[in-house]
Amino acid sequence: MADDPYKALGLNKNASQDDIKRAYRRIAKTDHPDLNSDPVAHDRFKAAAAAYELLRDPEQRARFDRGEIDASGQERQQRHYYREYAESDDNPYRQHQGFDDLSDVFSDLFGRGGGGGGGSWRGGAKSFDMRGPDQRFTLEIDFMTAARGGSTRITMPDGSVLDVKIPEGAHDGQVVRLRGRGGAGMGDGPPGDALLTMIVAEDPDWRRDGDDVETILPITIDEAVLGGKVEAETIDGPVMLTIPRGASSGQKLRLKGRGLRGEGGRRGDQHVILKIVMPSRIDAELEHFMEQWRRDHAYDPRGRR
Amino acid sequence: MTQRHYTLSETLEAVSDLTAEQLERYVSSGVVVPVQSEQGPLFREIDLARLNLVVDLAEGYHLDDEALALVLSLIDQLHGLRGDMRAILDAVAREPAETRLRLKTAIREVRVVTR
């Protein structure tokens, strides 16, 4: 940023707070990178935005004027312009446009569907009915709701509350269509639909790999040595799992059909990864036993590749 | 998927000159469409960048909500086309020289010669 934030805004130190705001707004109008693609304008805007960020708070401005902070030290993290996101193909805000004149070429080249949700004209010359537009939303759900299915309550932008049914085995990017919950129609046209694209929040305990899921099961050293039955969480609730004698950390046990409901209706598997966890305190007895044991039974798990 | 999400108050904190009432209005009019969750609305990085732009537009040009929606829709179209155009140009750049020349000739015929 320029050394002198006042200069970046075309002002001097005596400027009032209103002057500062007005100067920044004036520069934003002409040089905003979302409106003006000229790199020079971009630099001007960047300097002005950083300067405004520093001077807009009178207290912070006073500290700067007294030399307690310098201009560069106060720079906030790089501001991201809307265009950085909006140019990407999956910009969720780029949905209302048709580009009917270009759409053939574009859908051919970019593999997009036809200009979604357009209304159809009906009726005579004077009256027309048009179906309301579809509206797209993004809905975040937690892992278990996605796995088991269920319903989640959301508040629509217009303030109405909706219970949304989540299908069992829902995955990222899956779309739920709520008929008639989109934009209002014109004339006698029915309202459009609300399309909810789901994203499944990551869960520290459940890793997903296609229709399979992976969990980590902590076991004690005695369970690892002797084997035994241990309770393990599955999507359907806890089950008793048989740990084989002499189990190692990282060993995978497969629970067939305990994964997620796939497209064909078949469920994937759950992979349980064992993890041996030491007791919180190594007591004298264990230590003594291990010393004895090592003397006659030493082994090298790293020896052979 | 592992994208940072901002709650209402974090969003107000992150976007300068945005009041809670304005944000509520922008959400209900569909100017920004946050992610819905059981904990309430969550804003993505793109929503924050959009809100920054909205504040600059609304304050700089004194736009009411309808005019704002129009301007944003035009900007979305422009940015979308810019992204498409960039993709096409990148694709053209990967083609061999003779293909590029042929395209150049075709573009000139379509865009320059005809009126």
Image (cartoon, rainbow, N blue to C red):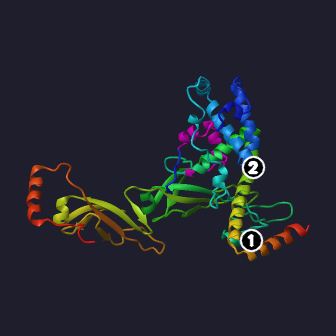
Whole-percent x, y for residue B34 in the image: 58, 50
Mark closer to the observer (2, 1): 2
Relative depth, front residue between A140 and A243: A243
Give, as a three-letter code, the residue at label 1: Val
**Residue with the mark numbered 2:** A38
Q: Secondary structure at mark 1?
A: helix
In which image quadrant can residue B55 be found? top right
Between A53 and A86, which is closer to the camera in this rendering?
A53
Quarter where residue A226 is shown: bottom left
Observer-nearest residue: B15 or B100?
B100
> Which chain hosts label 2?
A
Question: What residue is disc 1 on?
Answer: A105
Residue A229 visible in image: yes
Instruction: Confirm whether the magenta stretch covers residue B115.
Output: no
Residue B19 colored in magenta in the image:
yes
**Percent position of residue A152, x then y:** 49, 54
Look at 74% across and 48% down and name the residue there. Answer: A35
Q: Is residue A163 above or below residue B60?
A: below
Residue kind at label 2, given as amino acid type? Asp
Q: Position of residue B1 (x, y in %)?
A: 51, 57
The span from disc 2 to disc 1 (Cα, nearest Å) is: 29 Å
Q: Is A213 placed above or below B19 here?
A: below
